[in-house]
Amino acid sequence: MKKLTFIIALTGALLSSSIMQAAPSLSVSVGETGFTTLSATSSSGFVDIANGTTFGDFTIESLTGSGSPLFAVPYLDLSTFNVTTSLTSSATLTIMLTETGLTLPSSPLAVSSAFTGILDGVTSETISSYYDASNTAYGTASSLGITTFTAAGSNSTDEFGTITAPGLFSETEIITATFGPTSGTTESLNSSALITSPAPEPVSMGVVGAGLLGVGLIGFRRRKKS
């Protein structure tokens, strides 16, 4: 009886541990010098700042973050739509998305970071992504890619990296944009930062396809001989 009780208790502990690890925490924050940081947290895989939120010198029309368990690791997506301001002097806005409690399906894992920005009155924008093997929220121990845009209009770039965390880890994306001033007009920012597994290259897919075709032909010949 004692042995059965021990087994049940051990099973419960293992299940509790797996449940705890299977519920990553996703958080987004918005900061501007001189103002209290605005933040939101969720365990559903989706987090956002309410549309039309006024923060410091800025109005946030849309700010969303997506991750696990809504999507498979290493997916992490930070997107802004029409963050606007009218300034008489320059101001810098920092937007961060982080998710803790993640585990890799395999280690090491190749990833790509896709950065886009549409700058209207923004003098410079830096977008970066990181992972942290210490599983720290907003941790920046290991860089997965960083890009700075200074030209107006639409910009985009891709960076490639590798996550080698042996256990629980965190992912973080950061957008830092300096606005204005542009007298008499409204400045706006539309940007996104994405961490995901890189799509197979056409050549690689061709090699895989040829390999599968070869396996199929071998199986066909064996069946024909028998």
Image (cartoon, rainbow, N blue to C red):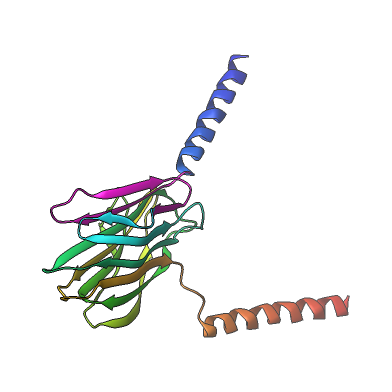
Q: Is residue 47 magenta?
A: yes
Q: Nearer the viewer, residue 164 or 190?
A: 190
Q: Name, please, the residue furthest toward the front.
A: 184
Q: Nearer the viewer, residue 171 or 79?
A: 79
Q: Is residue 68 magenta?
A: no
Q: Nearer the viewer, residue 21 or 8?
A: 21
Q: Is residue 24 above or below residue 129?
A: above
Residue 69, how many percent across, how many down? Answer: 50, 51
Q: Quadrant of the C terminus?
A: bottom right
Q: Quadrant of the N terminus?
A: top right
Identity of the residue drawn at 24% across and 73% down: 187
Q: Which residues are magenta?
A: 23-48
Q: Residue 95 falls in which quadrant of the image?
A: bottom left
Q: Name, please, the residue furthest toward the top.
A: 1
Query: Could one spot residue 135 in this view of the protein?
Result: no
Residue 128, how many percent across, how many down? Answer: 28, 67
Q: Is residue 58 above or below residue 186?
A: above
| Magenta stretch: dominant secondary structure | strand
Q: Name, please, the residue furthest toward the left.
A: 89
Residue 21, how many percent across, how many down? Answer: 46, 42
Relative side of 182 to 5, left or right: left
Query: Could one spot residue 45 in this view of the protein?
Result: yes
Q: Nearer the viewer, residue 177 or 172?
A: 177
Identity of the residue drawn at 40% across and 58% down: 65
Identity of the residue drawn at 37% across and 55% down: 165
